Image (spheres, rainbow, N blue to C red):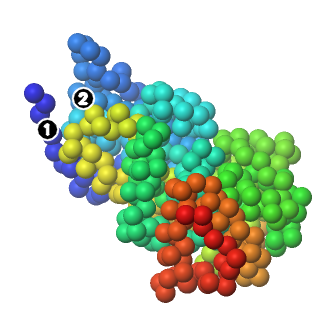
Amino acid sequence: MTTERNPRAGRRAFLAGTAAGLAVGAGAGAGLVWAAGRRASGGAPAVISGREVGTTWKIQTSWPGGVGLEVFKAWCASIVEKTSGELAFEGYGANELVGEFQLFDALRRGNIQAMNSFTQYWSGRIPAAVFLAAYPLGLRQPHEWEVFYYGLGGLEMAREIYAPFGMYYLGPVRHGANIIHSKKPIRSISDFRDLRLRMPGGMVAELFQAAGAKTTMLPGSEILDALANDVIDAADYVGPAVNLALGFQKVAKYVSMGPPGFMSIYQPVDLMDITVALESWRALSAGMQSFLEDEVRIYSQQHHVTIERADQAAWEKFGDAGVEVSRLSDEDVTAFTKLAVPRWFAWANRDPDAARVFRTHLDYMMSGTLGYVTPEMIQGFRLNT
């Protein structure tokens, strides 16, 4: 007989002790030693943080370092206490178990039980994934993505789309806008012509190709070396705090962003997610499943605000390092929008799932609530379904 524990028991302690949790995360990153993972058949149970553990999941993130990795490892380390030992997460940074772009296959093979990756990475396999994360000139503020996922059916659609791959899309994890680091100034759309630019692939890469850039796809852990060795001229990657920790200011003295209030025109709310192997998900109790669904929403908020807080100090340090920050103009936004609209529809028409997700976005963006898109902007374009 299995005894059900209350998985919510440690929630109040976590919310009240974020700073302590981050200290645990730093310890985890510095060499927290975990016991053996799952309980072997007929063997002794695993012991983690002094607790006997019923089930242990290996979960790898795409974060290679900085505050993103710290808050991820802190969260992973907290799970065993919150669940009173019913479940534990072994948290790993980028490339610690498998290559960053091998996470999808590793999850399907059972090498890991969960992944915390950038949703955009899988748009080549799942075209709809391009609309499950921020894309050029689409939804622009964090609360708009909350509305999409938790108010307009986005979460249910994502789970239906991932299920045929043997995966359960547990929930989105947000942080701030992406910025571009470059070795020469980028002050307008014309400056992207012939620029050798790292991008995450998908529609984002196609947008900058249309603006004349020569894009390449690299994992975050390889960007610094590529800039330092003159393999690329510029690179998009997350926000200032993480990029500062990775050392981008040492090799790229310019940062380019969108206009004030629109920090990034192409990924203004960069989204990651927690995705779980469907078999591992189904093995959990109903109470544990409910706990994790709530927990990911809490983690997403903490992840976002912790990184945003660190970003404020990072801007000053970029200035001290001699980094020049420039912003694109409203006219540049208009020019990029003209390039983006046909790519919205091209990607949406790749398969019915992509069209279904984009239709939800489009209706929202054309509504009186947002008004980002007018009928004139999409005249001549249509969805196939």
Report x, y in % for residue 150: 37, 65
Which quadrant, please, contains the C terminus?
Answer: bottom right
How far separated are the C-alphas under marks 1 and 2? 11 Å
The answer, for residue 49, to whether it is visible in the render is no
Q: Quadrant of residue 337?
A: bottom right
Which quadrant, please, contains the N terminus?
Answer: top left
Q: Which mark is residue 214?
A: none
Residue type marked 2:
Gly
In the depicted structure, whether residue 28 falls above or below residue 213: above
Give whichever of 144, 323 is nearer the camera: 144
Report x, y in % for residue 15: 30, 57
In the depicted structure, whether residue 378 falls above or below residue 213: below
The crowding category of the residue bearing disc 1, from other C-alpha atoms within 10 Å (few below 14, some 14 to 19, many at least 20), is few
Residue type marked 1:
Glu
- Circle nearer the N terminus (1, 2): 1
Q: Residue furthest top?
A: 42
The crowding category of the residue bearing disc 2, from other C-alpha atoms within 10 Å (few below 14, some 14 to 19, many at least 20), is some
Residue located at (55% from left, 84% from top): 371
Report x, y in % for residue 20: 35, 49
Give whichever of 319, 122 is nearer the camera: 122
In the depicted structure, whether residue 337 falls above or below residue 230: below
Residue on which the image places disc 2: 54
Residue on which the image places disc 1: 4
Question: Viewed as shown, does residue 202 lie left or right of 234?
Answer: left
Report x, y in % for residue 277: 41, 36
Residue located at (28% from left, 58% from top): 16
Residue located at (54% from left, 56% from top): 352
Q: Quadrant of residue 157?
A: bottom left
In the depicted structure, whether residue 33 falls above or below residue 137: above
